[in-house]
Image (cartoon, rainbow, N blue to C red):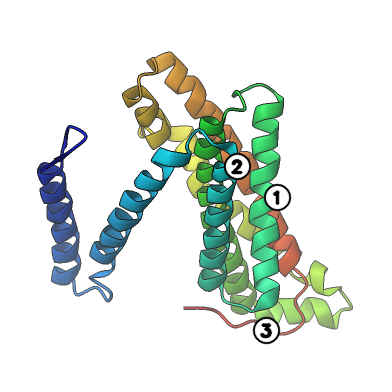
Amino acid sequence: MTVNGIALAPTVIGVISLAAIATIALTLFRVPGRWAPALAILRGAVQLAAISVVLTGIVTQPAWIGVALLVMFSIATGVAVRRTGGGRRTILVMATSIGAGAVVSIGTVFATGALQPTPRYLLAIGAILIGNSMSIATLAGRRFTASVVDRWEEVEGWLALGATPRRSTLDLARRAVREALIPSVDQTKTTGLVVLPGAFVGAIFGGLSPLEAGRFQIVVLAAIMAAGSITAVLIASWLGPVRTKPVVLR
């Protein structure tokens, strides 16, 4: 079966085989949730198929691209909230932190002329930044909460000495920010040596020269670092003032 000249059968066979390999490896080691990778691949395939159809019709329409990014942002916020646990306040924390990081970075990229403010670039870099900011927000929130729980006696000691709730967890918050950024920092440091990022490879497949693809990729990586730093700092600042021992989400 082919769609627009693309043979789908080999793709389907390859993806199913890779999902099976992941499931078998986890099953042999008796890992809980052994079906999670296969289900994630299935869900990703369905979502990618749907978004491919949708984007075909809106990729040149700025208004619809704005709607698409808003949907992505809403979903990213929801995922981060579920992963970190919490109520309405957590929704506000995640939404403002992810949104601020993405907006500042996108605005800087276009304002400096690093990329031209075209609908295609807006969609590409917007989606990348929202996704990465979501992951960093989740890591920062979970790491901060876990650190406070693990070192609650230290936090209580600060409070007993008259420190403010924010000061009592400030060192833990700073450490959580640093650790949340480690994956992004490592990816950036090893780009071209260990990793060929998806944006770089995709740009080459899309017809750009390796030099132009490399230019696009370094802009993306720098934007991810800026957005992630803003997001992680805001998350730690929002969650910093702690008066009672939080509950760790397992």
For disc 3, the marked residue is 245
Q: Look at the picture and state if 39 lies above or below 160.
A: above
Q: Which mark is residue 133?
A: none
- What residue type is disc 1 on? Ala
| 10 Å crowding of disc 1: few (<14), some (14-19), many (20+) | some
Mark toward the start of the polypeptide (2 vs 3): 2
| 10 Å crowding of disc 3: few (<14), some (14-19), many (20+) | some
> x, y (%) of residue 162?
89, 78
> x, y (%) of residue 203?
39, 26
Label 1 and label 2: CA atoms lie apart by 20 Å
Label 2 and label 3: CA atoms lie apart by 45 Å
- Is 137 left, or right, of 39 in this rendering? right
Front residue of 234 and 58: 58
Q: Quadrant of residue 32?
A: bottom left
Quadrant of the frame with the N terminus: top left
Q: Which mark is residue 63?
A: 2
The secondary structure type at the circle numbered 2 is helix
The secondary structure type at the circle numbered 3 is loop
Residue at the spot x=28%, y=54% of the render? Answer: 45
> x, y (%) of residue 139?
54, 61
> x, y (%) of residue 81?
57, 70
- What residue type is disc 3 on? Lys
Q: Which mark is residue 100?
A: 1
Front residue of 230 and 129: 129
- What residue type is disc 2 on? Ala
Disc 2 and disc 3 in contact, CB within 8 angstroms = no
Front residue of 121 and 101: 121
Q: Quadrant of residue 39?
A: bottom left
Residue at the spot x=57%, y=73% of the render? Answer: 146
